[in-house]
Structure formats: structure tokens, C-alpha cells
Amino acid sequence: MNISELIRLSLEEDIFQGDITTESLKLGNKEISAKLVAKAEGVLAGLDVFCETFYQVDDQVRIDRYKEDSEKLQKGDVICRIYGASASLLKAERVALNFLQRMSGIATLTAELVAKIGDERAKLLDTRKTTPLLRQLEKYAVRAGGGFNHRFGLYDMLMLKENHILAAGSISRAVELVRQTDSSHKLEVEVTNLEELQEAVSCGVDRVMLDNMSISEMETAVLKFHGKVELEASGNVNLSSISQIAKTGVDFISSGLMTHSYKSMDISLIFEEGK
Amino acid sequence: MNISELIRLSLEEDIFQGDITTESLKLGNKEISAKLVAKAEGVLAGLDVFCETFYQVDDQVRIDRYKEDSEKLQKGDVICRIYGASASLLKAERVALNFLQRMSGIATLTAELVAKIGDERAKLLDTRKTTPLLRQLEKYAVRAGGGFNHRFGLYDMLMLKENHILAAGSISRAVELVRQTDSSHKLEVEVTNLEELQEAVSCGVDRVMLDNMSISEMETAVLKFHGKVELEASGNVNLSSISQIAKTGVDFISSGLMTHSYKSMDISLIFEEGK
Amino acid sequence: MNISELIRLSLEEDIFQGDITTESLKLGNKEISAKLVAKAEGVLAGLDVFCETFYQVDDQVRIDRYKEDSEKLQKGDVICRIYGASASLLKAERVALNFLQRMSGIATLTAELVAKIGDERAKLLDTRKTTPLLRQLEKYAVRAGGGFNHRFGLYDMLMLKENHILAAGSISRAVELVRQTDSSHKLEVEVTNLEELQEAVSCGVDRVMLDNMSISEMETAVLKFHGKVELEASGNVNLSSISQIAKTGVDFISSGLMTHSYKSMDISLIFEEGK
Amino acid sequence: MNISELIRLSLEEDIFQGDITTESLKLGNKEISAKLVAKAEGVLAGLDVFCETFYQVDDQVRIDRYKEDSEKLQKGDVICRIYGASASLLKAERVALNFLQRMSGIATLTAELVAKIGDERAKLLDTRKTTPLLRQLEKYAVRAGGGFNHRFGLYDMLMLKENHILAAGSISRAVELVRQTDSSHKLEVEVTNLEELQEAVSCGVDRVMLDNMSISEMETAVLKFHGKVELEASGNVNLSSISQIAKTGVDFISSGLMTHSYKSMDISLIFEEGK
Amino acid sequence: MNISELIRLSLEEDIFQGDITTESLKLGNKEISAKLVAKAEGVLAGLDVFCETFYQVDDQVRIDRYKEDSEKLQKGDVICRIYGASASLLKAERVALNFLQRMSGIATLTAELVAKIGDERAKLLDTRKTTPLLRQLEKYAVRAGGGFNHRFGLYDMLMLKENHILAAGSISRAVELVRQTDSSHKLEVEVTNLEELQEAVSCGVDRVMLDNMSISEMETAVLKFHGKVELEASGNVNLSSISQIAKTGVDFISSGLMTHSYKSMDISLIFEEGK
Amino acid sequence: MNISELIRLSLEEDIFQGDITTESLKLGNKEISAKLVAKAEGVLAGLDVFCETFYQVDDQVRIDRYKEDSEKLQKGDVICRIYGASASLLKAERVALNFLQRMSGIATLTAELVAKIGDERAKLLDTRKTTPLLRQLEKYAVRAGGGFNHRFGLYDMLMLKENHILAAGSISRAVELVRQTDSSHKLEVEVTNLEELQEAVSCGVDRVMLDNMSISEMETAVLKFHGKVELEASGNVNLSSISQIAKTGVDFISSGLMTHSYKSMDISLIFEEGK
């Protein structure tokens, strides 16, 4: 499902056979303007989706943008101004905000986590713990906040997790099996201790996920394998722990936090005098 | 989009042309079991959707349920046990959890808010501030947590908000206009002070939304109009403020908090020994 | 399914992989005009859908409108004139007329019924007895003819019919049950005699449907309950009976006649000389 | 769009996010039965679609059939009996009846017209004047009533109507053009007088449509061309005129009446005692 | 599925959630041009589909055409030149070529076969042995190469093949059965010898398919029945055999070769200097 | 689009509103059998899709399989036997064969190419030069024939081709740019000579595509870089050239031949006596 279809279905979810209130008012083509205002600090993400929602409702709507995605917003900042028939603005408003507030919430939390990493080499990666059907938008929001994307789904990267390894018998056997079929995708293996890490490296995998390892184990991993294999820390990542994890020198830190437990950013659409 | 289609598209989002890792392992029909465990306290919601996700991947999967939606979970509680081919469980796991963890997160937050209302008459209502395409599931989760649903979209209730009233000229004029067209849906009007409330009541509306009124204004509203019109408090509703709002005696308290700023509940699927 | 999609699928139903006659003629871009003429008296409805059908086939088609929906047409009236490639007009003609003739047929019958109500207070309501997939258009046509819409589906109004009441045990029990779950939608109850009407009013429902009541029973119902509950007459509504029903003073008269047993209005598209 | 999809979308049109009345009643799995009764005389059509509607809502519903499509019904005849959860029956009832009543209305009117033809050779044909998206069902209903189908759309038969002939210059030229491209489909030409008929026959077309010809012209046409080309009468076909048209000896009589101006047949679903 | 939808899904198949290479390069709006060059001799088919693929990716792309469908191409011929953002050209290129190379391959092979028929009366017909979902495009390509289309599917022509005849009992019985139901579509019957041919002709069928008959049998068939029924040769048609088949004087030769065993034509898109 | 949907749409393409021949015959439920026979040597691929096509038409069809995908077939081999209503077999036959013959054609050509590689280390890879909408099936058929899959689309592997490099300025710059955004996917770079190869290796890419290099250049490439980077030969791969290319010692040989220029394998469905 592409973004345009996603917006179309979201509008259908909200409006279905009609906005009975607005249509009953028979407001005609009276044009008004409305400004989009940040009610809190944060990082903007989703302005294209926000605008496209209005355009789908009424292709006569015009929007002047003052801010762009990835920009840091202060409380009170005007993000854009929308001109169009009042009926169109009333119909599109809620769906447009439902996208924008969520995406900006993700970008904001991502930016906070990235700030904690500071100058360390680690890149912050997202996960597949995204809202069903919104993965593309949520992963975009992670990038807007300064993070990076891990795989998009089960189809674009080979990733042997604990349960795959159990099913195959061992890391070596699992790696051998997948490589017999697939030579085209990057291969990552989840490991939980240094022995498994050693085994994975010996198999020639591209990346290892250090799952819930202690800080000292991760330091050892970096010492022994940095540059030989990509090292990705995972587990218990939050605003308190991330700095220390980054200091171990791992290449990546992955976390579902940005997409499964963000708060929507408070952004309002304020109607102005009609023209 | 019905629930079955929603799950189908969510699986397609994650798997697309194939789970390249699991399929490369060629695990065959080896059957295993896995248990679904609460890793934190909370209220369960979404077990049907969770199960249906597995069934769509493989209709041979069987699930024994030990808990049901709306039940309070303790950390460590086993919610259900799943039996099926390991490849099927590995493919469905993430999408199924993405639904369940979000829905249970909503139910949990809703239940906390409802507990704060205690014995007061107010019912907690949700809003249209839901995740695009997940409104039906999120509103279900609110009910599972003990809340009630406000309108489902723009199509099933007449609601004159500030901007409609501005566009029409006055509350009286707006009510007159909508009633000329539509006699079949309930009519709610947003008011911001007692004068507007008086005007709305005079027009014979079914419900008023008291928007960001002070506690004392709400008390006056209840004193004058309880039983004559349904009174719904709205604005700045959170775990700290809701008890006091409820004590004013309003009939409803509506809040977007449960659906726009919840945390996913921590629930894990743990693979057990194969049979 | 929105209107645009409905038209797209209707064209696909008629044209599928190609209009083999018109395409074989290889008519090129030769532009012609055609006029849309009423061949009988009636009320116009569906001109937007008619035009959109041509635009979907060829966005170069232009249409000059002389009449608008809700207007009364005399035999011979020219409704609009269409300019475009002859191949495009030949492809779109039948589907466009299939919509317009049906919708105008509904508007015409509705207007006849409304005329019989005359100055009485009753509003004529439609029902859910509409053609599958065309409900939105048919309910629009009812409005174009001067009628009003009852609920759009099972999702936007609570309506306890005889079978719901049977299943719940009694009117009071049924009302209690639905109100425990749903406080947001209008509630109507079907009653068949004055005792049931009294019970429904006591429960505080918003509207009652007087099903197949005699004229004198309806007169009594109005005498006792007008202003306390909305009264809707239903059953055996037709061009002969409706005046007398309206004279009882009920607030609404609902009938499926306009949407289940109308005649298509005779409207023709007449090709004129090419330019 | 196949029939199964058509039913699915029709249910979605009526139920959308939920049958709020029935779901609020929480009726559980209580099973009941309901009988489908003809309230007027007519010909049955659409029983498969009717049943499939119930099955789509709940695949546990069972139906005993006593009548089949094409059968003549007397007032009071029980067509089938349905067993299932009351909630399922309540949800599916209206959509199922909306299909069945329309289809049976078409079959009934078709049978009346066919009866007027009596023993004459003419077969009654339908047209493309069908309800958008229901063409397949309506043409099926025509067959159930004893009629025959003309082409299904613009894609399965070559048909040169007046406007095609105008655009091409002459009947001969139009026939030549289409046959240069298409040798695989039957070719019919519309003619309005005996000279055009002669020209069409000379071109070797498969069928001619005698459009609005007088009875005596049609008699001449039959006299001269019966057996050399298929002769199809069209225009002003109704219950009064059809006998006389048939007596001219034409091979086919085509009319849009059966699909554009039928009345829904009165058929009711009556709930019986629960088991 | 219409062509526009077919292209949309084909792009989705190739790009899904993003062209990760091109998007990572962040090439901006830099416009370039590219020329489409024939790398071998052949007949062009599919230029509209090729162009539409680019337009769907980016409606700002412009294309200058130098060749049109059905034109014979020499190695080195420039077919068109495309101007647009390099990112857009990179995204659309492969899908656009996948259509064009296949369609031109079909047109090329068709033209070779048609050339072998030379001045004989036989028209070359395609079959239903087309690539799933591409039938409309492949049949178009056959026409572009100088061939003609047989029926488009099971829905637009009556065709009694060996297995139908077996199931019905005999040719005569099968013809009688289909004509009892369907008078509107052309009827073809498959025969394997002269006796069956005689029987089919006696039944008044419109066309016979001479299946795998010898050259001398076909000559006899033509001698006896040419002008009385359309004669279509089928079976073992290839570049070596087709001339001799055509010389028998049959009206049609049908073959699946053009659509089931063509080679893609070698056509390249060559990027030129940016502007 | 998943496989099930692909089959559904392919059946709709062929049958649309009905198989008018078979339905007119009114064959009832008479069950017959039919055997699927190889008419030439080859490798089987697509039996699941073949069977699923019959099951979608009629879920009462049963199939006994004697061969499986990847098996080598001799002329005359019976692949499976199908039991079901003759009407169902007649409807599904053509679409089912259209899939199977194409997929087996691809598997057969792939197996021939793989045989030419013999014991050399090179794996044969496919490309994105697949039939629109059939990529998943065609890539499956390549695997069934002993080949391997290159990337599935633009979304699952980073691949810098000549035009990307031109747009970015140089190999080094292009690699730097993509790695700034994307760390999760494998990165391949196209090179045309040994200098570019050296540059690509220095940038740390995962694989290089040696485009149209001479045999001696490829030998040098293998000598210098085997084991340091994956080496993939591309260009002018066919049954004559592939052995020599393989002998250079490259890791992979990629070719579009198997999917853009295969012949459908000759496989027939032969109806047997009814039961």
C-alpha cells in the first residue's frame, strides 16, 4: 500500500459516506485560512503526508510552508498556513493531524535518543515494532529524527534470531542453510554471549546483534571484533541507558522504543478569519 | 477495511514477497509450541486479532487461550499457548505482537483512567485522535479497558465544533442549519462558557461538550443542566486531573490520551521445546 | 467505496477489455456534441455522477449545464450539452444514463410523495431498502426530491426492531442493554401498539417507529406524545395513503418505495452534427 | 467484480464498522430460525445470492431451501428457512433481501412479458440498461424469468448503433471498418427503415435491430429477410404492445423494461421462536 | 484490471516501499535525458505503456516520440527521448522496458509469421495462451504486428472444443444446447476430420476450427465449405509450416506461438548528459 | 499481490462474467478425470500454482500428484491426475496451463544453463527482467531449475549501476552517499573495467558486477579479488558462452535470459473417460 492509498483509506475511515455535520451546514466555497502551530517543543516529521491529506480532500487547497521535516520546533512556531474552503479544512483536519502528531512524536523521541549518543560512533536503528500499516511512515520519522533504519520487513535482510537458530540446531548450521539459498541479502545473527559471537564471526556473517549483553561483554565484543563484523547492541535501550551503551563502541544500537511507545506531539490547527 | 483485510495487509507489509530467512532454513512441518507471556501488569486487549494473524499465515495453527480481553494481567501470566509449524510462528509473531501490545497498552491506560473516576457517574469517552486505519481496533481496546466510545467518525454523529459555529455565525444558526438537513443523528455542540451552554440547551441539542472549562464552571453547568442535556467534559484530561473533573458530576469525560499517547504493553512470545 | 470508484467499476463492468465496436471504427479525435434531453416530466438527480462518468472515460470532454439537481424538468428540456471525441461519448453514454435515469426516477417519485404531504409537518424519510452499492446515490436522490434521510446503515443509529426486542426480552430490557454500551448514537424503537409506545417513551428513547398502526392509533400517539418523543409512521406508505398518514401529525413518514420500486426516468442523449 | 466481492462490499456498505444495535445487545450464540415468505405472487430469482449473504456474515448459518430460482411463487409460499445466531440473521437480513427482492422483481416482470409472447417464435432479450454493478445478477434474473441475454457489455458483441453509423458515414462503411479489425464477434446493426435493413443484409451482418419500426414495416422485414438475417425488434416494448410485436414473426424482441423499471417483489423474513 | 492499474501494480512489485539505492543518493531534481534505442531489428509495440510507466512514477517527465507502434525498427533506431529527474528515470526504467521488450517481441514474431502468409487470404489469429494478467497487452501486440485477435476470453465467444463435445455427446447435441441459452455470441466448433466438419456445418455454426488436420484434408475442407462457414486452421503452426497452411485457402490460422514462446526484443535506455 | 490474488485475477481475466460455452451446456456435477502430460522433455515448475487455479474455480476438485517441482520430465510423463466436475476442469484448464507452461519453460532453460556451468563455483543468478506481476513466480521457477535469485526489486539490495554512478560523480562518492543513509542492505556496484573494480573494492562494497568484461579481464579480476569481494559476471550470457565465463572462477553469473526469452514448455491436459 503506497502513501497515497494509505491516506485515501484513512480519510475513508473517518468520513465514510459523508461528514454529516459539515455537509449539513452547506458552507459553500467560502475560503478561510488556518495556521498549524506547535504547542510543544519537538522535531517535525510528516508535513508531506499532512499536506497530501488536505489535497486529497480538495485539490484547490493551497499551503504555505514555513518549516520542514527534521526541523526542531519551539512552542508557538507556525509550521504552515492552509488556505481553502472551510468545509474542506474541517473534513481533512483530524486525519491530517493524526498522521503528523504521531510522526513528529517519533521524530522527537528519536532525536532525544540520538542526542544522548552524542559523538560516539553508534547509529541508532529502529526495529519492526511499528504500527501495522504505518511502517513506512514511522521509519521515515525515525530518519527525520536523526536515526537510521534497520530492515523494512522479513523480505529485505536475512536475520537469524534465537528461534531460528534453535530450529536449525546451531548458528553455524543456520548460516550454512540460509547461504545455500540466498546470496543476495545481508545476513545478521543474534547472539547472547561471547561464545556465540565468536561462532557467528567464524561463519562470516555481516552483522551480529548483541542481545541484552552487559556493558562489559559489549566492551569485550568491540575490543575483539570491531572492524571484522558490524556490532549491533539491542535490549533495554532507553533515555537513561543509551549513553553508556554507545560508549562501548558498538556500531549500532537498535530499539523499538521510538515506534512502540512514543507520545503524539501536541500540534494544533487554528482557524483564522475568513478572507 | 474490515479486520481480516487489515491483518492481511499488515502481514503483506512485513512479509511482502517472502520471509527470506525462515524460508531459506527450509524448516518443514516441524511443529513447536510457544507461550505468550505478560512481562508487565496490564489489561489484555486484542487476543482475537493476535490469533487471527497466526491463522492467516497458517490455518493449521492451534491456540489454547488462558486469558481473555478485558482481563487484568500480572507480570508472568501466560495468556495463551500456540501450536504450529515453527516457520509459521516465526512469520506471524511480529505482526501479531504489534497489534496486541498496542491494543493492550490502550486498554491498560484506559483502565487506569477509569479507576480514577471511581464511583462518579462520568463515563470515559475516547475521541477521533486514533491511529490512521486502526480506529476500530483502538476503540475496541478502549471498551476492553472499561471506557466508552464517542462517535466513530464524521459520519455517525453531528458535532458542531468551534470552527463550525464560527462558519455558521452562531450556535443557534448552526443548529438550525444542520437540523434542516439531518434529523437522524445525535447532535452535540462544543461550548466554551456558560452563556454558550445556555444557548445550546435552548436550541434543544442532545449533548454539549464543555471545552476546557474550569472545575467551578463545570460544577455550575451540572447544577443548572444535569438531566436536561448530556454534559461532556473535555480538555486537559490526564491521570492527575480526571478525578476532580469526574467529581463535578458531568455525564462524560472525553480524552484522546488513551489512543494518541499510550505505551505498548510488554508481552513476549516464548518458543518452547518442539514436540 | 466512494463515488469515483463506483463509476470506475461501473465503466469496467460495461467496457471491460474494450468497446470493440467503437475501437474498430477508429474514429480518431473527431469532436462532436450531444444534448441530454428529458423525454418525460420529472425531477433531475445525478448530474454530477453523469458528468463524472464522461470525465473518467476522457478528461477532455466538456459539458455545459443548463439544469441542476432538484430542478423540475418538462418533457423536451435540454439538461446539458456534451462536447468531446465521438468515441468517448459512445463509450460513456450508457453507464452515465444508467445512473442518471435511476437517480432522477427516485427524485421524481420522492417529489410526488412529498407533494402529497403538503403543509403537514411530516418529513418523508427513506430506508435501507436501497440497491446494493448505490445507497449513497439513492439517498442523495431522495434528498434531491425533497425527502430526508433515515440512517445510512447499521453503523450510525441505534434502532431496536421487533426482532431485537424479541431477542432481548422486552423494550425496556433492550434499551437498557444498548445504553450500557452506546451513549453516542440516537436510539429509535419500533412499536406496534400504544402500550409498546408508552413503554418506549418511559425508557427515554429518542424516536419511535409506529409500525403499521391504524390512522386512529397514530392520532392517539400524536395526541399523547408529540413533543415528548419523535414519532415516525411506517408501513403501507404509497401515493394513495400518504396524505392521510401525514394528517395524523406524525413527525416523520418512512418508506422504501422511493428506492425499491421507482421507474427510471426517460432521458436521452441525442448526438448532434459534428463540428 | 465477482458475486462474492459484490456481496462483501454490499455488506460493508450497510454494516461498515459495526451493527451498533445488535452488537450492543450482546446476544451471544443463541440460535434462532427465520422463514422467508413470499408476500405476493411472482417468480423467484436470487436465492443463491440471498444465502451467500448470510454465509458471508456467519459461516455457521444453515439454510433449508424449499423453492428454487425460476419457480413461480404464490402469496404465502415459504421459500427457505434459515438457522443461525440471531445476531447474524439480524445483520445479514436487509442486504440479502435487497438483492432477492430486486432480482425476483425482474424475473416476475420478465415472465409476464414472456407469457404475452406465447407461442410466437420471438425470444425476449434484455439490454445494457441495467443497474450499475448489478448487471450480471440482473441478466441472470432475466434468464430466471424465461428471457434471454443480449450482449453483456461493449466487449462481447459488435453493435453498430445509429451514432456509430453517423460517425462512419454509412452502414456499409461502418461494417467494412469493423470487419477489418474484428472477425471474432457477432455483428449487429441498428436500422430504422427497410432501405437500411436491405443495406445491412447486403453487407452480411449477423443480426439487425429494427428500431422503433411500425408493425407493418416489421411484417415486411420478416417476409423478406427471415432466415437470411436475425431480426430483432426494439422500442416501445411493454405489456400492452409485446404480443402484437411478437406476431410479426421477428426472431427477437429486446427491451430495457425488465431491468430499468421493475418493482421489488414483496418477500419477508419472519423470525420464529428460538430453539 | 485496466492498463493503468496493471502498471501501478508492476511498479509496486519492483519498488515496493522504496528504491533504496536511488533514494539514498538524494539526487534532487537534477534533470537528464535518455534515449530509447533498438538494439536489434523488430516491430515496435507498447510505447504507450512504456511512457505511462514513466508518467506514473513522475508526472513531470516529458517524452518525445520518433517511432510509433507497428513501425519496423532497424538496429540503432532511436524510438523516443525522455526528459526528467534522474531519480524518476532510474526508478521507472526496468518496469517500462519489461513491458516494451515483451510486447515488441510479440509484434516482431507476429510480423514474421504474417509475412510468410503473404498474399493468401488467411488472417493470423492469436489464442488464449497468453501470460496471465497481460492478455490485453499481448493481444494488442499481436495486432501491432499485423495479426488479428481471436476471442479475448471464455466470456465473448462460444467455442465448443473436443472436451465440450465429449461431455455433451455429439457436435449436434452440443450446438443445440448452447443455442438454447445463448443467441448473442458467435459460435465456433473444433473438428478433427471431415465428417465432424460436415456435421458442424449442418448445425449452422459460424466457424469451425480444423484441429491438426493434414494439408490435404484442409484443402478438401476449403473446396467444400469455403464461403459457407469460416474455416480456421490450428495446430503445429510455426515459421516453417505456416506458408503451406495458408496456401490451402483457409480463412484463419490460429497459433499460440506469438504469445507463449516469443523472445523479448533487445531495446535499451541510454542515459545522456544532464542538461 | 500475493499468489492467491494473482490467480484470482488471472481467472477473472479469462472468465470475467462467465464461461458462456460451458455454462450453456449445463453439464451439472458429472465428474471426470484428466491427466497432465509432458509433451516434451523439461524441468517441472509451478505445480502448486497449477493446482491452486483448479481449487479456486471449484474447491471440490481433487488432484493426485506424481511429480514435483524441480523434477526432470521425459516426454510422456504423467505429472498429475485431476478429478472433478467437467465444467470446473474446462474453466480452469487454460489459466492453469498458462502458468505451468511458462514456469516450467523457465526452469527448463535455467537447468540447461546450470548444466553448462558444471562443477565450476559460479552460481547462476536471475535479474529483474521478469514479466510484470509474475516476478515472484518466475524467480521461484529459476530456483526450481537450479538457479539462484538476485535481488527481488529495488527495495531489498543496494545496487549502484552505471547511471547512478554518473549521477553521483564517481563510484567512491556514490558509495559514500548510500552508506550515509543505509547500513542495512547489501551493496553491489557495477564496474566495466579493472580500474573501476579496484575503486569499488577499496570502498568496501559487498559485491561487484563485472559488466560485459572480456574473459581475460574477468580472469584477472578473479586472480586479484576472489575472496575479498563477491564477483558477479554479467552480459552476453547464453548457452554458448556460459561455460567459458564460469571457468574464469567468478562467484556469480547473472542473466535475464531465463525470464525474458524462454519458451513455454509443451504440457497438455488430457480428458479421460468420465466415471
Image (tube, coloured by chain):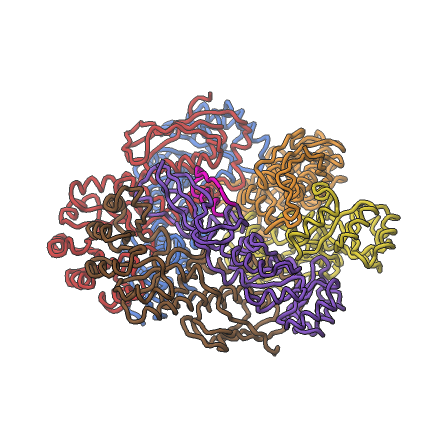
Chain colours: A blue, B red, C brown, D purple, E yellow, F orange
Residue B176 location, quadrant: bottom left
Q: Is residue F20 left or right of residue C42?
A: right
Q: Quadrant of residue A76?
A: bottom left
The percent coordinates of residue C241 (x first, y second) are 35, 64
Residue F123 visible from this viewpoint: no
**Residue E28 vs residue E100, the one in the foreground:** E100
In the image, is residue B134 part of the stretch drawn in magenta? Answer: no
Region in magenta = D49-67
Q: Is residue B76 above or below residue D149?
A: above
Q: Nearer the viewer, residue C224 or B13?
A: C224
Residue B57 to residue C190: above or below: above
**Percent x, y of residue C16:** 59, 57
Find residue C135 and report its horizontal and vertical position in percent: 42, 58
Residue D52 colored magenta? yes
Answer above or below: position of E44 versus C272.
above
E17 horizontally vs A49: left or right: right
| x then y, percent, for residue D83 | 42, 39
**Residue at image coords 68%, 48%:** E177
Tell me what residue is drawn at x 22 percent, y 41 percent: B114
How many numbered marks appear? 0
The quadrant of the rendering that contains the C terminus of chain D is top left
Side (left or right) of A152 relative to E249: left
Residue D103 visible in this rendered orientation of the protein: yes
In this rendering, would C8 be left or right of A95?
Answer: right
